[in-house]
Amino acid sequence: MAMNSVLMAQWREIRQLTYDYLDNLQADQLGLKMPFSESQPIGYQFWCMVGAHESYLRNLEAGSWQGFASSLDGFDKVTPQIIKEQMQAADASMAKLLNMIDLDESLENGQKGYEIVFQMIKHEMHHHGQLINLLYCHHLPIPKSWADEWALAYE
């Protein structure tokens, strides 16, 4: 179960970066997009991160993919605070789950549990890249942690 604690520590570091970005956002900025029609807004990036995290956790619990769903769909108006609260709830569920299962065990679908957690980490980092593009496009403040982690600056 040592792998569980290592992966949870890695997840917490990555998720803290996500929280730092959210803490710099205003609700009206969730609608900002890149200047091309296929662009998804900032809010979509977080909707997808929340939904993927929750969906991956259901996959770990059930042993097979249960479909994608985001708890953010249950809100009439989503704000950065609501996003953060949903992420924190998923983080708490993940911490409990990783204390109960062995990620080295094969799931019902033959996949190892740690592979699901790696997918979750890769997915979050993908959206970090999207958020960096949106940050630069709209000249949003760069969180210190992002400046340090991803060597971001306005120059």
Image: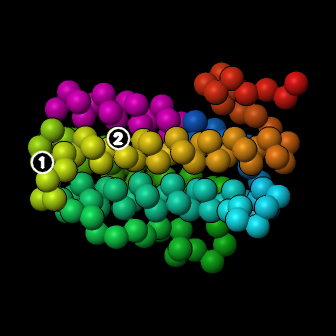
Picture residue at 20% right of the left edge, 27% below the top:
2
Residue that label 1 marks: 106
Q: Is residue 37 left or right of residue 81?
A: right
- The image shows residue 97 at horizontal and vertical percentages of 24, 49
Dominant SS in magenta: helix
Amino acid at dot 1: Ser
Amino acid at dot 2: Phe
Residue that label 2 marks: 118
- The image shows residue 23 at horizontal and vertical percentages of 68, 44
- The image shows residue 65 at horizontal and vertical percentages of 27, 64
Q: Quadrant of the C terminus?
A: top right
Read off the magenta span.
1-16
**Residue 54 vertical placement versus 142 (above, below):** below
Secondary structure under badge 2? helix
Picture residue at 37% right of the left edge, 30% below the top:
9
Q: Residues within 10 Å of mark 1 (few under 14, many from 20)?
A: some
Residues 33 and 83: in front is 33
Instruction: Tally the marks.
Output: 2
User: Could you say which quadrant of the image residue 37 lies in?
Assistant: bottom right
Secondary structure under badge 1? loop
